[in-house]
Image: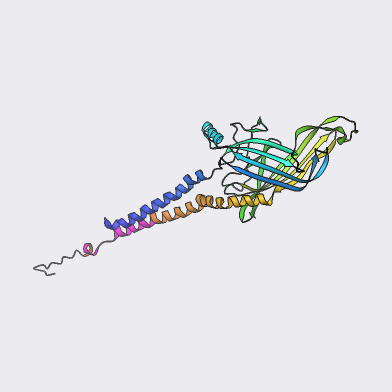
């Protein structure tokens, strides 16, 4: 049996390596491809020449518009929600403010409790999801694309302004500071989403005319640059248009093409470039290498054992007897 020892060792090593390849793919990767529950990030979107309704002076204005968004994860609430739902849930608290003049009173602001699947990024309706303290049921993607994002047109992204999810379309690939990204676009059609009390003279009335209830309309075109491995949005552009309408007349409320600041994009790339490369190794590179090597060793050991089994030793083949026969000789 000693002559079969080497093939057995080779086959055992091959089986071990093959198993490791499968474990990388089906055990390690699903446990690594999850968003953190203790997220703490700040992202800044800016337009240096936006047009807006200046509420401070009650007139149209123009200038720099900066929107700052902060996200803070809630690990305890995420753990409790996961236990209650049987799903892997993340709960993040989000707040954002838009400022057009640098004073202490923002032009616009909101707070949200976001509840979503840690793997897919899809909204989950439970566990206190809200906007400005009011309960809301969301759908689609909220803050990121799924891990292992695919170049398809089947995703939807939640628009917090109108409270609905709209399709996202894949448009191609681009290099972003050394990272390959998938580019997606979304069109939010013009929608009436609110009313606001404004002076009647803004819509052609006299200086002494009273306040009127103007309808507020909104449309948006978003472009996302997404790391396909982690699903993180590394850069984003919003071409947003809002206006007030009353009695057939319109008043510009907001017209902006805003984008992540260069510092925000550079920070995203720095944070996720190595994470993306490592996760890609666990998802694809290591499983492929280990699987191929394991199969090669298994086949090599099997072939070697067959060769050894067919080979006969010289003693068996000649059946020589070193002793001399007394009649016939050697």
Task: Say left or right for 254 vs 122.
Answer: right
How far across and down, in percent of the image, does residue 188 sit? 71, 41
Q: Work out whether residue 141 or residue 205 is closer to the camera in this orientation and state it.
A: 205
In the rendered image, the residue lying farthest to the front is 104
Q: How many marks?
A: 0
How far across and down, in percent of the image, does residue 292 sit? 45, 55
How far across and down, in percent of the image, does residue 122 sit? 60, 39
Q: Is residue 17 magenta?
A: no
Q: Residue at x 41, y 52 (%)?
A: 17
- Tell me if I can see residue 141 in this picture: no
Quarter residue 309 falls in = bottom left
In the image, residue 126 sits, relative to residue 302, either above or below, namely above
Question: Mostly what secondary structure, the magenta segment?
Answer: helix
Q: Which residues are magenta?
A: 299-315
Q: Is residue 311 magenta?
A: yes
How far across and down, in percent of the image, does residue 306 sit? 32, 57
Q: Quadrant of the C terminus?
A: bottom left
Task: Say left or right for 279 vs 262.
Answer: left
- Tell me if I can see residue 77 in this picture: yes
Q: Quadrant of the N terminus?
A: bottom left
Task: Say left or right for 56 vs 162.
Answer: right
In the rendered image, the residue lying farthest to the left is 326
Q: Work out whether residue 290 or residue 262 is closer to the camera in this orientation and state it.
A: 262
């Amino acid at each position: 049996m000693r002559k079969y020892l080497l093939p057995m060792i080779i086959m055992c090593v091959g089986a071990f390596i093959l198993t490791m390849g499968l474990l990388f793919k089906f055990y390690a990767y699903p446990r690594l491809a999850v968003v953190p529950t203790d997220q703490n990030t700040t992202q800044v979107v800016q337009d240096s020449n936006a047009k807006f309704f200046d509420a401070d002076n009650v007139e149209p204005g123009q200038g720099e518009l900066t929107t700052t968004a902060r996200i803070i994860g809630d690990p305890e609430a995420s753990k409790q929600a996961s236990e209650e739902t049987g799903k892997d849930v993340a709960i993040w608290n989000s707040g954002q403010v838009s400022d057009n003049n640098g004073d202490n009173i923002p032009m616009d602001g909101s707070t949200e409790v976001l509840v979503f699947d840690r793997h897919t990024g899809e909204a989950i309706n439970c566990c206190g999801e809200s906007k400005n303290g009011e309960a809301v049921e969301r759908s689609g993607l909220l803050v990121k694309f799924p891990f292992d994002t695919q170049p398809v047109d089947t995703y939807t992204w939640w628009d917090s302004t109108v409270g609905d999810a709209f399709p996202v379309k894949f448009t191609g690939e681009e290099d972003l500071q050394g990272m390959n990204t998938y580019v997606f676009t979304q069109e939010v059609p013009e929608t009436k989403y609110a009313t606001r009390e404004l002076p009647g003279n803004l819509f052609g009335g006299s200086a002494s005319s009273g306040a009127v209830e103007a309808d507020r309309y909104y449309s948006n075109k978003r472009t996302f640059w997404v790391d396909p491995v982690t699903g993180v949005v590394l850069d984003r552009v919003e071409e947003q248009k809002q206006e007030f309408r009353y009695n057939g007349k319109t008043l510009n409320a907001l017209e902006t093409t805003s984008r992540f600041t260069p510092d925000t994009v550079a920070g995203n790339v720095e944070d996720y470039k190595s994470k993306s490369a490592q996760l890609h190794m666990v998802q694809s590179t290591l499983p492929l290498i280990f699987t191929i090597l394991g199969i090669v060793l298994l086949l090599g050991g099997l072939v070697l054992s067959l060769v050894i089994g067919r080979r006969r030793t010289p003693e068996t083949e000649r059946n020589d007897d070193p002793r001399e026969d007394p009649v016939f000789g050697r």
